Amino acid sequence: MIEQGYDRLGSRYFEWTTSQGPGVREWFLDEVLQRLPVEAVVLELGCGPGTVSAALADGRHYTGVDLSAGQLVLARERLPDANFIQADFTNIELPSGAFDAVVAFFVFNHLPRAEHAPMFERVWSWLRPGGRFMLSLGASDTHDEVEAGNEAAAPTATAVLEHVVSSIVDDADAVRVEALPSKGRIKLQVKVGPGDLGRVIGRRGRTAQSIRTVVRAAATRDGVEVDVDFVDD
């Protein structure tokens, strides 16, 4: 499901990530780069469309892994000389002691917490002595303090949802996203203009499900869980 979601989003995911002003991603990238020497051998898990691949690869030996073939097409266009692998990083086979650093930006949110420790052990086996594992993780286990109608409760998820839906519909100006409390979660209700609901639902609901997958992943940056409903105005 995650693979299909990112495949269907295509370039819209990259456009959203690069349209945001400086934030957590840029801060984390700067922290990572300060710890990566020239000629380091670097592995990025969940590289997506190559959002930060060029920075990680600059003067280094870079390998990017991602589940989505569609996102890797975009990554290879941006960085044709880099080594990209389409695979599920939870079961990929990589040589022991091969990397100076393993980096993961906003990707472990796709992995159940119970699977984190076994995955960390795999990463340690790929690292050389003194190597670094640098990753982002969720910071909260509580999701029950939400104000009704407050999009600030899930700003990243709201921004991703509005951007993606606006890029699909005919009337982008009619797109509205409202955050509502829902049993310890946040319900993001999306309103679109007349005739546009079918475009965001898609054939057999596939487009809507892909959007939900990506928005839920984005919500981990907000420390909340979200549901997404689509309605027409």
Image (tube, rainbow, N blue to C red):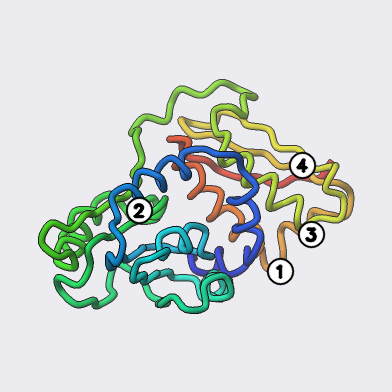
Query: Label 3 near label 2: C-beta < 8 Å?
Result: no
Q: Amino acid at mark 4?
A: Lys
Q: CA distance from mark 1 to mark 3?
A: 8 Å
> In the structure shown, which secondary structural element does the residue marked by tag 3 occupy?
helix
Q: Residues within 10 Å of mark 1 (few under 14, many from 20)?
A: few
Pointer 3 or 4: first along the chain: 4
Residue matched to label 2 = 108
Where residue 127 sits in the image (x, y, percent)? 17, 64
Where residue 204 sits in the image (x, y, percent)? 67, 68
Given the current orientation, which residue lies at the most extreme left position? 129
Select label 2 or label 4 by which is in front.
2
Numbered badge on residue 198: 3
Q: CA distance from mark 2 to mark 3?
A: 32 Å
> In the structure shown, which secondary structural element does the residue marked by tag 1 occupy?
helix
Q: CA distance from mark 1 to mark 2?
A: 29 Å
Relative placement, left or right, of 25 versus 150 is left
Q: Amino acid at mark 2?
A: Phe
Q: CA distance from mark 2 to mark 4?
A: 30 Å
Residue matched to label 4 = 191
Relative placement, left or right, of 71 versus 132 is right
- Where 51 falls versus 78 (above or below)? above
Q: Can you tell which quarter of the image residue 150 is in?
A: top right
> In the structure shown, which secondary structural element does the residue marked by tag 2 occupy?
helix
Which is nearer the eye, 147 or 56?
56
Q: Residues within 10 Å of mark 4 (few under 14, many from 20)?
A: many
> In the structure shown, which secondary structural element does the residue marked by tag 4 occupy?
strand
Q: Residues within 10 Å of mark 3 (few under 14, many from 20)?
A: some
